[in-house]
Image: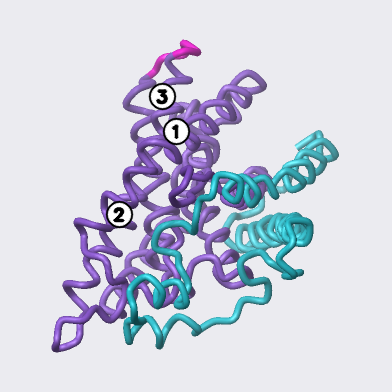
Amino acid sequence: MRDRKKIVLSLVVAALLTPLGLLLPRLFRAGDAWGEWDTDDIARTLGYVPDGMARLAELWRAPIPDYSIWGDGSWLAASASYFVSALVGIILSVGASYLVLRFIVKRDGN
Amino acid sequence: MHIPDGYLSPKTYIPAFGVSLFFWGVAMRVVRKTLSSRSIPYLALSAAFSFLVMMFNVPEPGGTTGHAVGGAIASLLIGPWAAVISISIVLIIQALFFGDGGITAIGANSFNMAVLMPFVSYLVFKGIAGRSREKRRLAVAAFLSGYVGLNVAALCTAILFGIQPYIAHSPQGVPLYAPYPLQVAVPAMLVPHLLIFGVVEGIITSLVFLYLYSRNPMALYVMRSEDERP
């Protein structure tokens, strides 16, 4: 990879654009992805929360749940959260890939 | 398409972990044999790309949201087995750090998006492009590779949701996990993917493919014949 600077720059630009993925659904009044509702939504639509679901739903607390860091509900806070999440995601994806692949792939002296 | 915790019964998510573990194992062996350390940056970039693509939620106006996965272009660029590893890494990060997809569902989500999708996408591309080097045909092949790949993944996800009421319910018949049966889950998942999200995956696959192809066709795994691969 010769043009490392260009790649890093395009990743940051792409991260800057990700809030569109948050704002467009709001603009078009689209709800959650199908089958990805939280238990409050399930209780509202079904009238109950299935037993097994209630048991497993809160199994794991993610450090940045739903890509949201600053959750005051404003679109600015949501967009900033989303952008920072994108940067964190890029760093984790690249870092984990190197970690895993260094372990799998044999070195060819290059 | 990220199944959260609580939607799949252990009867589903435990075998799904088994299936994905099997594919991860094979993928590691294949990648160790076929890839050199020079290809690591491609795999890392394709993981970052896939992470970013999945953040771009696309609305179905007034309905649900969905997104492309980047699994098709990953498969064409680094090969289906490397894509298995690359997309699985992304899905695990999404589940652990962002709560996007459940940790009990990592096996199922990996099977749908990181195993099924890359292989379907790869086969569709190969089937349509053949040995052709004609740009228009390659563009169509790349589009359909993304379109079909995402839709097959969505269908499998819908089936996993939809079988839950049959296989996991209380003695009174009340669902214990995902509550909607197949006849609800399949159309609800598939229609927006067929109409919108699959098209988005197809366009992304086609555009990125053409860009990479114009720069250096041999950088694309799918364009190298068997003997040219390292």
Residue B132 inside the magenta-drawn segment: yes
Q: Mark 2 points at which residue?
A: B156
Q: Mark 3 points at which residue?
A: B141
Q: What stretch is highlighted in magenta?
A: B131-136
- Hue used for the chain lettered B: purple
| Front residue (pair A63, B34) | A63
Mark 2 chain = B
Same chain for mark 3 and mark 1? The answer is yes
Tell me which residue sits at (44%, 33%) in the image.
B199
Could you tell me the amino acid type at mark 3?
Answer: Ala
Q: Mark 1 points at which residue?
A: B199
Q: Main secondary structure of the magenta part?
A: loop
B74 is higher (above) or lower (below) than B169:
above
Q: Which percent across, then down, holds residue B188?
A: 32, 52
Tell me which residue sits at (45%, 80%) in the image.
A57
B212 is higher (above) or lower (below) than B163:
above
Could you tell me the amino acid type at mark 2?
Answer: Cys
Mark 1 chain = B
Q: In the picture, residue B18 is in which quadrant?
A: bottom left
Instruction: Please identify the quadrant where the N terminus of chain B is shown.
Output: bottom left
Q: Which percent across, then down, holds residue A86?
A: 71, 55
A98 is higher (above) or lower (below) than B40:
below
Please tell me whether mark 1 sits on a helix, a strand or a loop: helix
B98 is higher (above) or lower (below) than A22:
below
* Rendered image: mark on residue A41: none
Could you tell me the amino acid type at mark 1?
Answer: Val
Residue B62 inside the magenta-drawn segment: no
Q: Can residue B36 be seen in this view?
A: no
Report crowding for label 2: few under 14, some 14 to 19, many 20 or more residues within 10 A (C-alpha): many
* Left or right: B188, with B49 as reference point: left
Give the mark, 2 or 3, whose residue is nearer the N terminus: 3
Tell me which residue sits at (75%, 70%) in the image.
A72
